[in-house]
Image: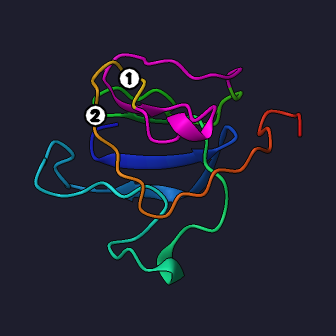
Amino acid sequence: SGTTVRVFQNGTQIGSNLTSSYNFNDTTNIVRIGNEGSTSVGSAYKGYITNFRWVKGTAVYPSNFTRPAPPLTAVTNTKLLLLADTSGTATTDSSGLGKSVTNISVTWVTADPFGGT
């Protein structure tokens, strides 16, 4: 929302609001999901990510919320939507924009993040 960036996990905001003047429309920089500016294993996120939606221009969740039933859908101003329901779709953009996603070090896990195994 404006210059405020928030990150939510399972409907609860994690960390504090971040104020950023970064131009998220800048196409010269690479967006890294689950890693810092380097591709080293040491800087990689150690966890699981599924149903990842990047939205620019619409504050979808300005505060804590009840996690929606999967799968997520593209909402107004969705820039990237990763549903990852199979290993073959882990890097497929489902936003309708056809963004290119490169897998540097993603490993597919068959565990069901929505209650199954």
Q: Which mark is residue 95?
A: 1
Looking at the image, residue 17 lies above or below residue 80: below
Q: Is 19 left or right of 70, judged from the image as shown? A: left
Relative depth, front residue between 32 and 109: 109
Residue at image coords 63%, 22%: 71
Q: Is 90 left or right of 81, judged from the image as shown? A: right
Amino acid type of disc 2?
Answer: Lys
Residue 8, horizontal then vertical, whole percent: 58, 45
Q: Which residues are magenta?
A: 68-92
Residue 83, horizontal then vertical, whole percent: 55, 31
Residue at image coords 58%, 34%: 51
Q: Is 16 left or right of 48, judged from the image as shown? A: left
Please report contact status of discs 1 and 2: CB closer than 8 Å, yes or no.
Answer: yes
Amino acid type of disc 1?
Answer: Ser
Q: CA distance from mark 1 to mark 2?
A: 8 Å
Question: Where does the C terminus fall, quadrant-wise?
Answer: top right
Looking at the image, residue 28 lies above or below residue 96: below
Q: Residue under label 2, please give it.
A: 99
